[in-house]
Image (cartoon, rainbow, N blue to C red):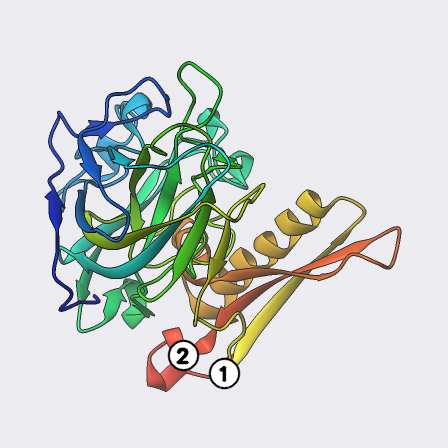
Amino acid sequence: MSETNTAIDHHLPATDETIHSVWNNALEPVLTIDPGDVVQFECRDATNGQLTRASTVADLPSLDIDQIHPLTGPVAVEGAQPGDVLSVEILALEHQGWGYTLVLPGEMGLGLLPEEFPEPAIHVWDLEDGVAHFTNGIEVPIKPFPGTIGVAPAADGEHSTNPPRSVGGNLDIKHLTAGSTLHLPVAVENALFSIGDCHAAQGDGEVCINGLEAPMSVTCRFSLQSDRSLERPQFETAVASGRDEPMYGTTGVDSDLYEATKQAVRGMVDHLHSERGLAREEAYILCSVAVDLKINQVVNAPNWVVSAYLPEQLFPDETAGHQ
């Protein structure tokens, strides 16, 4: 959890009137702000409250997928015009002490390996003292960020929140933690900014279709740059892309990067199952929340290398360093 003492100009609650689950530049703004304003957004979990602390795997087949990615907004930024850049400084994120990670039924075709995980699964996490508690004493550091953050697209009509876009959206960049700034290309008048889908933690790749999903509040400061243009989002962050700590890695080698990614994750699931004693669905969940995917090389044709990195500090002291 991160906090800020910055004065908040506007508080936007997550109500049925301030929530939407599609991108659409025809949506009426629920708030209008000036550049320089600080807004605290209340954000529902990714299922729009369909899951709770008490949820079990029995609740997953009946999930209404159309409600996924409830976004708080849109917020109009006074003076923003197409071609401008909206800079969003993320000041603070505050969770509510719990979250979840789930595997949806494989028949839905979601996630990296749906064919290998036909049955749904869920883990409800307790979040306390900077960590999220998993099975077997495993603790995942909490590093909150908004998974979906962006402005309205130029194209008219309704657009799904699932794919990322040139104007932001479902970016799932885990380095957009407190202290980071996201720069977004403005596509419509007043920008129409929305945010949601907050994660308490996530591995690069988010391989089982979600990270550690959690309801949160996010506090942001907005600024406008009219003398700059962007084609796609850019960001500033102090979070390092690499870590100097013990890791265990598995690799994928293939002429197709997506297949190489699958190979790397399959290898990590196998490792966590055989060497760390996790059930395969637990291993898949942990990969989505704490394992980072990296492209090691794309220049030595015809094959490319993708690796999955597992931080060994997640495990209790008595098993740390075990391989």
Residue 198 % position (x, y): 29, 48
Q: Earlier in the sequence, mark 2 or mark 1?
A: 1
Q: Secondary structure at mark 2?
A: helix
For image coordinates 35% across by 85% down, the residue present is: 318
Establish if 321 lies above or below 73.
Answer: below
Residue 291 % position (x, y): 48, 62
Image quarter of residue 283:
bottom left
Would you name the residue on which mark 2 appears?
Answer: 313
Residue 302 % position (x, y): 88, 50
The kind of residue tagged 2 is Gln
Q: Using the image, tell me which numbered label, if any, was put on residue 65.
A: none
For image coordinates 52% across by 51% down, the residue present is: 205
The kind of residue tagged 1 is Glu
Q: Residues within 10 Å of mark 2 (few under 14, many from 20)?
A: some
Outermost residue, right side: 301
Establish if 163 lies above or below 254.
Answer: above
Q: Nearer the viewer, residue 72 or 199?
A: 72
Would you name the residue on which mark 1 appears?
Answer: 245
